[in-house]
């Protein structure tokens, strides 16, 4: 039976960006809000100690069924799709981008400046940190500027990281605690962290995940949540460019159409599925897709690559107390002669974690001898006299216009719709700099090793992009961007795009807090128009 | 719905092949459930045999009680195993949904049985009646035939029962505590402040148990 969903605001997508928009609009207005998510709701918080146990013992997915069979985006970051999105699984890492990230063209002559500055986003960073609850230790102001403090003090530094920090700072590079969305004290109804060390499946709720926001809004009667409902097409009104309806179906009754009517549509479906829906909506007056007069929908998909190393260090560490904890340095995201010593564009973060690489029990020794009985334990003890750490640097990559999400006409989901694929393509400037950048980061790792002592166990250079975004990038020029500085589509006055799709670059840090801050900024403007 | 399906698939498995483990130790839960559900295959892991096997594979320094504890844990782990379970989605990958391996117990049971037969043919007595050193020689030779590598996999992926037992034993937090001589207690939830201090040393009695 056909069904209609009517609301003042329809939010398509159910991840962290959706949660931020829904909460902010619900607070600022009395608008009716419908959240539409293709995945299922897995509101099983009460069962998470059990799912965590099975994750530890058997490696099982703690969010069983958080995907849609036959519905995937090639080269996407993850297969997961459920209410809460990837922020169900996330590690809760919440650094901000740096001020320089927003002004690459002005400062370095590469890439594209955002239409907003760090200062424009700062209050929304602050708001996002308050809403999701961030515990952090400010870094030196020149590298980590903030207009306000963190909502919560940092989690106490683990024993291993205390030693790691002393070791790393012998190089002269300052490190501080990576901020996290994990409660160092009870926060907004969620418990204090008890270091279960399985943050992808936090059994206590100390790590933020969007299901908390959605459950709270549902209990307050402020949203309706339509999960397992897949939107296939945005349909413009006949007499204007505004979006009139969205065509959808419920996965349990795919033959029965669901029509969504709203005054405002917010696309908060992440960097992959937002572009996918816009391209899928091509037709009539919009032959290249909705919001795509510029031809940039799905383009400028961005992200950062990384260099990762495991190192042996001359101190006894005890891995296993809190592996999720890490140190951060933004020293080389700054613009100065030490960060860019050769005048070339290079920017990256530095992170350090405890590790047990090279320090685990094993079955054979270095000579290939089997280790049965006491021999395995003796071999293990011999190797743990020294510790190991993981070092990593995310470096900025400028995306080419051809770094894009496209539809694959021959690969379709079970309902006959073409599925997307992403091809990451570097801008020529990043192609040219890649080798230099990776060598420079390795050199900086070795500088730390030389100063603190230790040896490189292995080093790898990533080929993928992490923390991707883009596809609907923001800009002032409607010919070269999809949305304006507030996330409103240039081509459709009542269509808003929130979070990851709108970013211009991925900088050198995890992106989720920035996606949340951008979503709140979009929501603030949307709310002012309701 | 999902959980019900999951339980049913576990029941189905145990009914057809899984009482493998139930016959060993019958701890609670799935094993007892399976035992009530009817006939099983004859691939039962023989507890005395498994015990004799474990004595030759696990560290001697954990003592008899340590071996019993490791075996209880191993059997409990097998009883709780869900064949072909849904796995976490790999990060930075859009590959299809990943599923785990089938239940390893039938394979491991047949390996144990074969080792016992081999012991009888080579030495005139079953594995359990051989001195620990002889058992270890037989097991090591079998591992070489199985091309066991340097690293211990996740237990369910172990091709050989010895690797499975060792992988499970060394994945437990108490094994790391034993190696480090400290109460790290990995994977335990704990109060925030406690992680800031160096883990306390293990008492001698803890180390032995």
Image: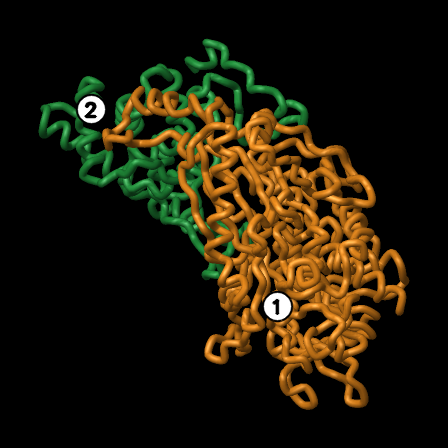
Q: Position of residue A236 (x, y in %)?
A: 74, 83
Q: Colour of chain A?
A: orange
- Identify the secondary structure beneath mark 1: helix
Residue displayed at 27% across by 26% down: B53
Q: Position of residue A439 (x, y in %)?
A: 46, 49
The reply to whether label 1 and label 2 mark residues of one chain is no
Residue displayed at 14% across by 28% down: B119
Name the residue carrying label 1. Answer: A273
Tell me how far mark 1 sits from mark 2, CA to CA.
Answer: 58 Å
Where residue B157 sits, quadrant-wise, is top left
- Identify the secondary structure beneath mark 2: helix
Where residue A2 sits, quadrant-wise, is bottom right
Residue B36 lies left or right of residue B41; in this view the side is right
Which of discs 1 and 2 lies nearer the camera? The answer is 1
Q: Colour of chain B?
A: green
Residue displayed at 60% across by 26% down: A162
Name the residue carrying label 2. Answer: B135
Vertical relation: A398 (above or below) A495: above
Vertical relation: B172 (above or below) B101: above
Can residue A373 be seen?
yes
Check the residue under mark 2 and report the chain it is in. Answer: B
Structural crowding at the residue carrying mark 2, measured as other residues with C-alpha within 10 Å and reported as few (<14), some (14–19) or many (≥20): many
Check the residue under mark 1 and report the chain it is in. Answer: A
The colour style of the image is by chain
């Amino acid at each position: 039976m056909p069904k209609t969903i009517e609301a003042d605001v329809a939010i398509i997508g159910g991840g962290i960006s959706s949660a931020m928009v829904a909460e902010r609009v619900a607070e600022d207005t009395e608008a009716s809000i419908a959240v539409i998510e293709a995945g299922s709701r897995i509101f099983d918080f009460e069962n998470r100690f059990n799912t965590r146990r099975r994750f530890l013992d058997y490696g099982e997915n703690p969010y069983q069924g958080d995907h849609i069979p036959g519905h995937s985006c090639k080269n996407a970051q993850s297969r997961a799709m459920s209410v809460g999105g990837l922020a169900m699984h996330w590690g809760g890492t919440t650094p901000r981008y740096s001020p320089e990230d927003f002004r690459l063209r002005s400062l370095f002559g590469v890439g594209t400046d955002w239409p907003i500055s760090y200062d424009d986003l700062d209050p929304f960073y602050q708001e996002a940190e308050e809403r999701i609850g961030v515990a952090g230790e400010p870094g030196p102001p020149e590298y980590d500027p903030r207009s306000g403090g963190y909502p919560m003090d940092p989690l106490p530094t683990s024993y291993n990281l205390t030693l790691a920090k002393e070791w790393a700072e012998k190089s002269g590079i300052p490190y501080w605690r990576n901020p996290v969305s994990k409660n160092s004290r009870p926060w907004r109804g969620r418990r204090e962290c008890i270091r279960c060390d399985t943050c992808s499946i936090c059994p206590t709720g100390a790590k933020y995940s969007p299901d908390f926001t959605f459950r709270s809004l549902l209990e307050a009667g402020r949203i309706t949540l339509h999960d397992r409902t897949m939107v296939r097409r945005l349909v413009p009104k006949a007499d204007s460019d505004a979006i009139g309806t969205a065509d959808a179906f419920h996965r349990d009754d795919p033959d029965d159409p669901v029509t969504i009517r709203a005054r405002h549509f917010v696309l908060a479906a992440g960097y992959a599925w937002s572009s996918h829906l816009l391209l899928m909506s091509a037709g009539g007056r919009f032959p290249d897709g909705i919001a795509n007069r510029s031809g940039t929908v799905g383009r400028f998909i961005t992200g950062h690559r990384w260099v990762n190393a495991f190192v042996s260090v001359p101190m006894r560490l005890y891995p296993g107390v809190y592996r999720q904890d890490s140190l951060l340095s933004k020293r080389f995201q700054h613009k100065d002669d030490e960060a860019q010593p050769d005048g070339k564009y290079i920017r990256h973060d530095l992170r350090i974690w405890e590790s047990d690489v090279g320090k685990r029990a094993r079955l054979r020794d270095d000579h290939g001898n089997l280790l049965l009985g006491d021999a395995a334990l003796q071999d293990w003890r011999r190797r743990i006299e020294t510790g190991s750490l993981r070092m990593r640097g995310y470096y900025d990559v400028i995306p080419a216009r051809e770094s894009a999400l496209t539809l694959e006409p021959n690969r379709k989901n079970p309902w006959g719709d073409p599925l997307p694929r992403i091809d990451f393509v570097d801008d020529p400037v990043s192609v040219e700099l890649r080798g230099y950048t990776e060598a420079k980061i390795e050199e900086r790792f070795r500088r730390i090793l030389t100063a603190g002592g230790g040896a490189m166990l292995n080093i790898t250079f990533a080929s993928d992009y992490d923390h991707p975004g883009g596809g609907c990038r923001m800009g002032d020029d409607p010919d070269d961007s999809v949305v304006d500085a507030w996330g409103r589509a240039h081509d459709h006055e009542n269509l808003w795009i929130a979070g990851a799709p709108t970013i211009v670059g991925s900088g050198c840090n995890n992106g989720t807090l920035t996606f949340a801050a951008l979503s709140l900024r979009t929501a603030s403007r949307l709310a002012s128009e309701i | 719905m999902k959980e019900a399906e999951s339980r049913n698939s576990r029941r189905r498995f145990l009914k057809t092949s899984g009482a493998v483990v139930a016959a060993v130790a019958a701890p609670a839960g799935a094993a007892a459930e399976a035992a009530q559900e009817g006939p099983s295959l004859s691939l039962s892991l023989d507890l005395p045999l498994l015990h004799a096997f474990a004595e030759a594979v696990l560290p001697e320094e954990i003592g008899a009680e340590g071996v019993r504890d490791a075996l209880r844990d191993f059997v409990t782990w097998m009883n709780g195993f869900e064949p072909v379970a849904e796995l976490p989605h790999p990060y930075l990958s859009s590959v299809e949904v990943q599923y785990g391996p089938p239940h390893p117990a039938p394979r491991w049971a047949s390996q144990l049985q074969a080792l016992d037969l081999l012991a009888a043919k080579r030495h005139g007595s079953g594995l359990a009646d051989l001195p620990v050193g002889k058992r270890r020689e037989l097991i090591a030779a079998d591992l070489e035939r199985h091309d066991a590598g340097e690293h211990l996999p996740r237990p369910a992926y172990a091709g050989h029962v010895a690797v499975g037992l060792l992988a499970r034993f060394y994945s437990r937090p108490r094994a790391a505590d034993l190696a480090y001589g400290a109460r790290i207690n990995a994977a335990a939830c704990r109060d925030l402040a406690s992680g800031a201090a160096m883990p306390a040393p293990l008492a001698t009695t803890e180390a032995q148990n």
